[in-house]
Amino acid sequence: MLFFVLPFSTLFGLFAVIPIAYAVVQSLFIVQRTGTFGRAREVFGGLTQYGRVFSDVPFWTSVGRVLMFGAVQVPVMLGLALLFALLLDSGLVRGRWFFRLAFFLPYAVPGVIAAIMWGYLYSPQLSPFTAVTSNVDLLSADLVLWSMANVVTWVYVGYNMLIIYSALLAIPPEIYEAAKLDGAGPVRTAISIKIPLILPALVLTTVFSIIGTLQLLAEPQVFRSFSSAVSSTYTPNLTVYSTSSVPNFNLAAAFSVVLALSIFLLSFTFLRFTQRRGIR
């Protein structure tokens, strides 16, 4: 038994437990100098860094920003993924293999490349769609967050669609035959049979999306070169990156630990809510 568990335990320890433990240890230290130009040295500071994290207004503003981002972008993205998966499974679409590949293709594009590509499309000076971008500034302070939401949706709709579509393929065909005998049409079958049976897949994609939303980094980092509205603390992960670039690794570690705990609590709360509703 130990032989089968050992490979997973080793990889889990190397790539999950040890980095988290190292970040927690780093967050408990502060840097002190003797005089203005004295040599820096790390000393144990207890919860000093966490006090700075919880009093950091830009960090919590960025947390609120990504939560608002997720409250809009995640339902839109998963709604589109569900719609596309149901259409592919309905039999109304010909060439399903082509559409599966076409929808998944954006996920194969690295996030940085996708953000650069869309940044050029949004830019009034560089976009081929000047009739739109010259009248609507998609990189302004009011719209740049939703411009990034469009990029994230474009990249991840196909990925989530394939997860949902795989769950649809696992439904026994006998259930569809019974529904057909009862006189259920395609829409009724989708609403009353397909969607309830794939709720676990929808829960899984929602949890993945919650985790991804709070870790938003590549898109705002790239969009900083296109829009002055994106600051170095625009998202929590960008705050961690900017703080570690100062460099202040101890404070960045404290930011990371608090962000990881926030992601865990949010995901855990969502899973508990869905389990109480009987979605397993």
Image (cartoon, grey):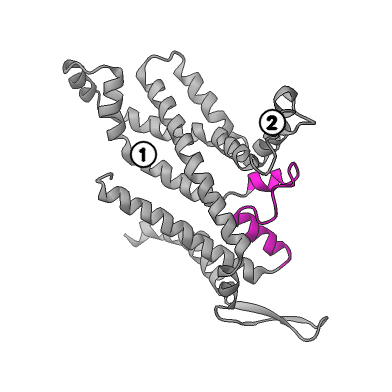
Q: Quadrant of the N terminus?
A: bottom left
- Which element is circle 2 on? loop
Q: Amino acid at mark 1?
A: Ala
Q: Residue beneath label 2, please?
A: 136
256 is higher (above) or lower (below) than 159: below
Comparing 107 with 274, the one in front is 274
- x and y percentages locating residue 166 in the rendered image: 38, 31
| Magenta span of residues | 218-247
- x and y percentages locating residue 242 in the rendered image: 69, 59
Residue contact at pointers 1 and 2, CB within 8 angstroms: no
134 is higher (above) or lower (below) than 40: above
Q: Is residue 201 magenta?
A: no
Q: Is residue 226 magenta?
A: yes
Per the rendering, the mark at residue 201 is 1
Q: Quadrant of the C terminus?
A: top left
For image coordinates 60% across by 36% down, the residue present is: 151
User: Which residue, as the protein is rendered here, is positioned at the far right?
Assistant: 37
For image coordinates 34% across by 28% down, the residue present is: 169
- x and y percentages locating residue 182 in the rendered image: 16, 18
Comparing 210 with 68, the one in front is 68
Asked if residue 195 shows in the view, the reply is yes
- Which element is circle 1 on? helix
The total number of labels drawn is: 2
